[in-house]
Image (cartoon, rainbow, N blue to C red):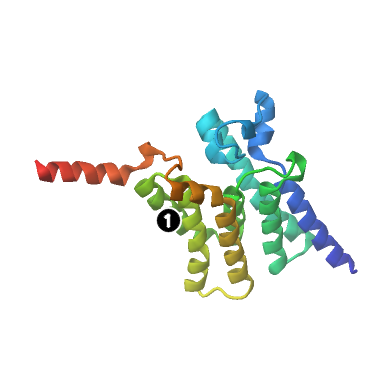
């Protein structure tokens, strides 16, 4: 094995270990809590917001986004390019979802994906955020919003003329986010998924207009 290959493989392992540092669980130690015992039991930003408030959730999301950013920087320092950088981001996401430091029970990976995309393709972040926001304002479902934004990534990559590793990376991200949100989709199908009613701005506007027209 060459020294260059060994270094890039070490960077992938390092990205996984970095991803295993969960933002909510790390911050939770300062409060003496394990967020996985509260709310939905997930270690991500949404459950952090529901159970601990927006400041705790913001700190959680910033840490988790930072992991995706640092994973890219780590691989670049190691000299890895192309598919190796995608591998580092995916390793960080996998570490977030299945963290070795926390019994392989972590979050769902969306924030770490955002951090990686911010480094690799920053122009994609805004349209994907708009997809996420439009779905949230329409339905109030965070999980559904995240899944649809993830599924929009390979579509956006294809429309932008991306090929090869980019399309593979985008497809893997979409599949992984769909998988990690499978419980949300199951609850959505069963009609038991938690909905942020205050986020349903479009529904309230439509209701007011319908009421005004009926009057």
Toward the left, the furthest residue is 215
Residue found at the far front of this picture: 190
Residue at horizontal 13 percent and vertical 42 percent from the top: 212
Q: Residue at x 48, y 57 (%)?
A: 149
Q: Residues within 10 Å of mark 1 (few under 14, many from 20)?
A: some
Question: Residue 165, can we see it?
Answer: yes
Image quadrant holding the N terminus, namely bottom right
Per the image, the residue denoted by label 1 is 131
Identify the image quadrant of residue 59.
top right
Against 162, residue 175 (above or below) is above
Given residues 215 and 170, the one toward you in this image is 215
Q: Measuring from the top left, give residue 80's x and y in whole percent.
A: 75, 65
Q: Position of residue 101 (x, y in %)?
A: 76, 41
161 vs 200: above or below: below
Q: In which quadrant is the C terminus drawn?
A: top left
x and y percentages locating residue 17 in the rendered image: 76, 48
Q: Secondary structure at mark 1?
A: helix
Q: Residue at the top extreme?
A: 32
> In which quadrant of the rendered view does residue 102 lie?
top right
Instruction: Name the quadrant containing residue 10.
Output: bottom right
The residue depicted at 67 percent of the width and 58 percent of the height is 90
Give the tally of numbered discs: 1
Vertical comparison of 95 with 48: above or below = below
Q: Up-down: is 14 above or below 83? A: above
Q: Residue at (56%, 61%) from the top-left corner?
A: 174
In depth, the one of 208 and 86 nearer the eye is 208
Q: Measuring from the top left, give residue 178's x and y in whole percent.
A: 55, 56
Q: Residue 118, can we see it?
A: no
């Amino acid at each position: 094995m060459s020294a260059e290959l060994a270094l890039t493989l070490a960077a992938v392992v390092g990205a996984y270990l970095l991803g295993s540092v969960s933002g909510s669980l790390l911050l939770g130690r300062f409060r003496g809590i394990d967020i996985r015992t509260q709310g939905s039991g997930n270690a991500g930003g949404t459950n952090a917001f529901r159970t601990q408030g927006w400041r705790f959730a913001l700190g959680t999301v910033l840490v988790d986004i930072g992991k995706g950013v640092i994973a890219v920087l780590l691989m670049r320092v190691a000299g890895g390019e192309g598919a190796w950088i995608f591998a580092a981001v995916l390793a960080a996401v996998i570490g977030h979802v299945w963290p070795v430091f926390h019994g392989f029970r972590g979050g769902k990976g969306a924030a770490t994906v955002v951090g990686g995309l911010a480094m690799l393709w920053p122009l994609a972040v805004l349209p994907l955020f708009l997809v996420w926001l439009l779905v949230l304002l329409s339905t109030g479902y965070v999980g559904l919003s995240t899944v649809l934004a993830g599924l929009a990534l390979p579509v956006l990559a294809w429309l932008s003329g991306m090929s090869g590793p980019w399309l593979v990376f985008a497809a893997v991200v979409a599949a992984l986010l769909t998988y990690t949100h499978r419980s949300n989709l199951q609850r959505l199908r069963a009609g038991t998924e938690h909905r942020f009613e205050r986020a349903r701005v479009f529904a309230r506007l439509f209701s007011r207009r319908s009421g005004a027209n009926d009057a």
